[in-house]
Image: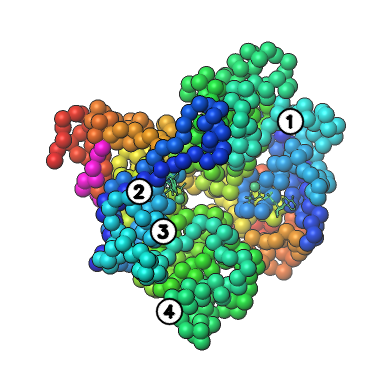
């Protein structure tokens, strides 16, 4: 059953230059006020109990999508529903309801906890505010949650600075779980952790997801982490989903030229020296995306149609793929559908 | 072959309010011309302080308290401040995680690179620009002549890092210390830079120390690997030796916890506990509280066992290679 449904979601930001930008504009004689197309036409459905990975390079729109799903940003176009109820219109009185249903966990466990608040207060603040817990039960619930994330109940009385990075990320997870969310959005939740600590937090996440049947959007740029914890994976490029498939299919048989190139360009442990093939060219600017398929300036298979026409997501041998090769070819006038 | 960089017994301490922190503790390694040495370790293990200590860039409350840093046979630690400054940038250069530590935001790339040339070499401005352009070519920057006229903010993060690397190359140094230079970059851009750096080492014979926390990166890039833990090098050897048959329990644990080596969804082997605080570190092996092989003797300082692929451990995983 679909829990989260994202349909036709786009997000545009108008970027006005800051002080430094304005100063540099004067030096260079250019103007930097423009529109960023952060997301374009995103369609994603996440069934209850699934962990969906969002992968892509910096600026492709992963966090923006996470924030829209969490109700922090409103989409420019399209709609997001949770359990069939629209998320975008849950303004005013309803926004509280939304913020309990979706919880976001961020990259930096140092920045996301209030340094002056005891851990117990940090965890119970949300549920108390939203009337989920009474004052009398809060203490016991906090202790339960701390134990669920592998910390001692007595830690409730400590301040965040008394914890290591991995422990703080556990506290952030406990705080999110306290809201009994229907959906977790983890935005690079293990990226800032050391390898040895990252394994601890990933193990905790996998165990909790089994036990609580969690549904989650798992945002990460680390392909091996995503493969390990996600059921399905969406690959994003410049604000669009270019491929979406089960993790097993995607990693065994990537279909989209960008996905293939991305996998080939990542050094992996144990494959030996120089066993990777970098993608040529630069990531294009979202201020000025290339026409047609945004990947065409870097794609070894690009043809005339790729420069003229945006490929649509179509069913492929595995999953769905947005590439003309999967839809009649890259010559002009060869539209299949 | 003679080492381009030979570090012996380097020790750097910080006198902090909480106590003495020995951030770099009796560190020794050598890098031959054209080779890349990956210095790996987790946050706070002393990688950056090692890099700064090699260049003599440690300020109070820090102090390099012991050791030698031989670059092409000259011990930088015995040089007068002026002579050391002449060596820096010329014989040994540094590249940082944030290229803006090297680049000046209000100067054109070409102007600042030309200035960097003329700091050490008395050449015309024109000749300096030519050398800057050649250096940009070397690191694979397309349309180098145009990029020289750009300001740093007009370049992508990956381009800026290439400019920083090109700047480090201007004087054809014997040694480059690169501190997490691709950590902030995207994977596809990181891949490009790693490939260029590998080619540079092979073609120019520059010895490179590549500081990173990313095991996968060093395993794909480096010839040799040193693993740091709590200020010490606990294991060193060729990349094949260290990744393929680690001898130190910490290295073993690190490699085991990488997800790509395990079936998806399965619990990952994890190293218990957290990285140690360096203030008032107890005596003996600092990995002891987290080590599955620890015994009583580990409360005493572990010996360095093996010469070809040494490990600092009382109970290394494989016998010392002959
Ligand atoms: N509040 C905002 N105002 C203006 N532009 C924004 C804002 N938030 C995001 N953007 C822009 O939208 C694009 C997508 O950004 P987003 O943060 O979603 O990318 P990301 O995929 O999460 O990248 P990263 O991997 O670096 O976190 C970028 O070009 C970014 O600069
Ligand atoms: N100026 C300073 N004063 C006091 N202690 C310092 C100072 N600089 C570094 N240290 C300490 O030295 C130790 C090693 O730090 P270093 O920056 O070398 O770690 P690192 O391995 O580079 O870590 P990271 O991966 O986080 O960059 C740390 O414990 C740090 O707290
Ligand atoms: S649509 Fe064309 S340019 Fe885009 S990925 Fe497919 S082949 Fe390459
Ligand atoms: S010396 Fe002892 S505690 Fe330290 S790594 Fe070796 S076995 Fe483990
Ligand atoms: Mg992001
Ligand atoms: Mg560092």
Q: Kindly state the secondary structure of the residue where label 3 is placed.
A: loop
Name the spot of residue A119 as percent of width and height, x first: 58, 72
Marks 1/4: CA distance? 62 Å
Relative to A320, is B316 above or below?
below
Identify the magenta region: A310-319
Q: Chain of mark 3?
A: A
Q: Kindly state the secondary structure of the residue where label 1 is placed.
A: loop
Q: Chain of mark 1?
A: B
Identify residue for label 1.
Answer: B88
Q: Residue at x 48, y 28 (%)?
A: A30
Marks 2/3: CA distance? 12 Å
Identify residue for label 3.
Answer: A72
For the rendered model, the colour scheme is: rainbow
Q: Residue at x 43, y 33 (%)?
A: A282
Identify residue for label 2.
Answer: A11
Identify residue for label 4.
Answer: A132
Relative to A319, is A134 above or below?
below
Marks 2 and 4 in Cβ contact (< 8 Å): no
Name the spot of residue B149 as percent of width and height, x first: 54, 22
Label 2: how many residues lie within 10 Å, few (<14), some (14-19) or many (20+)? many
Which is more N-terminal, label 3 or label 2?
Answer: 2
């Amino acid at each position: 059953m679909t829990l989260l449904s994202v349909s036709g979601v786009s997000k545009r930001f108008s970027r006005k230059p800051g002080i430094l930008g304005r100063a540099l504009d004067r030096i260079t004689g250019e103007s930097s006020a423009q529109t960023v197309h952060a997301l374009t036409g995103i369609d994603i459905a996440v069934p209850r109990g699934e962990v969906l990975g969002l992968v892509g390079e910096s600026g492709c729109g992963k966090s923006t999508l996470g924030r829209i799903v969490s109700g922090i940003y409103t989409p420019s176009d399209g709609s997001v529903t949770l359990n069939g109820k629209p998320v975008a219109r849950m303004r005013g009185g309803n926004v509280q309801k939304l913020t309990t249903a979706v919880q976001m966990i961020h990259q930096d466990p140092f920045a996301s906890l209030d340094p002056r608040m005891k851990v117990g207060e940090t965890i119970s603040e949300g549920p108390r505010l939203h009337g989920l817990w009474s004052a009398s039960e809060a203490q016991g619930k906090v202790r339960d949650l701390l134990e669920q994330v592998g910390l001692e109940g007595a830690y409730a009385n400590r301040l965040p600075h008394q914890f290591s990075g991995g422990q703080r990320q556990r506290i952030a997870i406990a705080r999110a779980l306290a809201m009994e969310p229907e959906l977790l959005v983890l935005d690079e939740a293990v990226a800032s952790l050391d390898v040895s600590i990252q394994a601890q937090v990933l193990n905790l996440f996998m165990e909790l997801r089994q036990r609580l049947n969690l549904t989650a959007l798992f945002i990460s740029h680390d392909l091996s982490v995503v493969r390990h914890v996600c059921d399905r994976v969406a690959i994003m490029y410049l604000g669009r989903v270019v491929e979406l498939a089960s993790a097993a299919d995607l990693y065994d048989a990537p279909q989209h030229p960008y996905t293939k190139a991305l996998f080939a360009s990542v050094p992996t442990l144990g494959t030996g020296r120089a066993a990777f093939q970098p993608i040529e060219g630069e990531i294009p600017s979202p201020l000025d995306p290339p026409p047609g398929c945004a990947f065409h300036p870097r794609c070894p298979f690009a043809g005339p149609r790729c420069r003229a026409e945006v490929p649509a997501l179509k069913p492929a041998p595995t999953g769905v793929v947005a590439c003309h090769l999967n839809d009649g070819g890259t010559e002009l006038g060869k539209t299949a559908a | 072959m003679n080492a381009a960089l030979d570090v012996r017994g380097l020790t750097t301490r910080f006198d902090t309010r909480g106590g003495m922190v020995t951030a770099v503790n009796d560190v020794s390694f050598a890098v031959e011309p054209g080779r890349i040495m990956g210095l790996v370790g987790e946050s706070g293990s002393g990688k950056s302080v090692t890099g700064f200590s090699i260049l003599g860039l440690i300020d109070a409350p820090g102090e390099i308290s012991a050791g030698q840093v031989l670059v092409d046979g000259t011990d930088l630690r015995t040089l007068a401040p002026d002579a050391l400054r002449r060596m820096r940038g010329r014989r040994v250069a540094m590249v940082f995680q944030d290229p803006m530590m090297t680049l000046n935001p209000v100067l054109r790339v070409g102007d600042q690179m030309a200035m960097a040339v003329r700091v050490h070499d008395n050449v015309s401005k024109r000749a300096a620009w030519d050398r800057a352009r050649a250096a940009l070519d070397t690191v694979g920057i397309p349309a180098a002549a145009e990029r020289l006229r750009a300001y740093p903010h007009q370049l992508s993060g990956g381009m800026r890092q290439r400019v920083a690397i090109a700047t480090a190359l201007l004087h054809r140094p014997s040694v480059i210390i690169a501190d997490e230079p691709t950590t902030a970059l995207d994977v596809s851009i990181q891949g490009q830079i790693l490939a260029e750096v590998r080619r540079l080492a092979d073609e120019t014979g520059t010895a490179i120390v590549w500081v990173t926390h990313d095991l996968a990166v060093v395993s794909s890039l480096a010839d040799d690997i040193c693993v740091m833990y709590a200020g010490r090098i606990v294991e060193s050897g060729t990349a094949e030796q260290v990744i393929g048959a680690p001898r130190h329990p910490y290295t073993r644990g690190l490699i085991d916890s990488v997800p790509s080596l395990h079936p998806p969804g399965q619990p990952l082997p994890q190293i218990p506990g957290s990285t140690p605080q360096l203030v008032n570190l107890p005596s003996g092996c600092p990995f002891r509280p987290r080590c599955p092989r620890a015994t009583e003797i580990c409360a005493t300082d572990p010996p360095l066992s093996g010469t070809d692929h040494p490990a600092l451990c009382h109970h290394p995983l494989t016998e010392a290679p002959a």
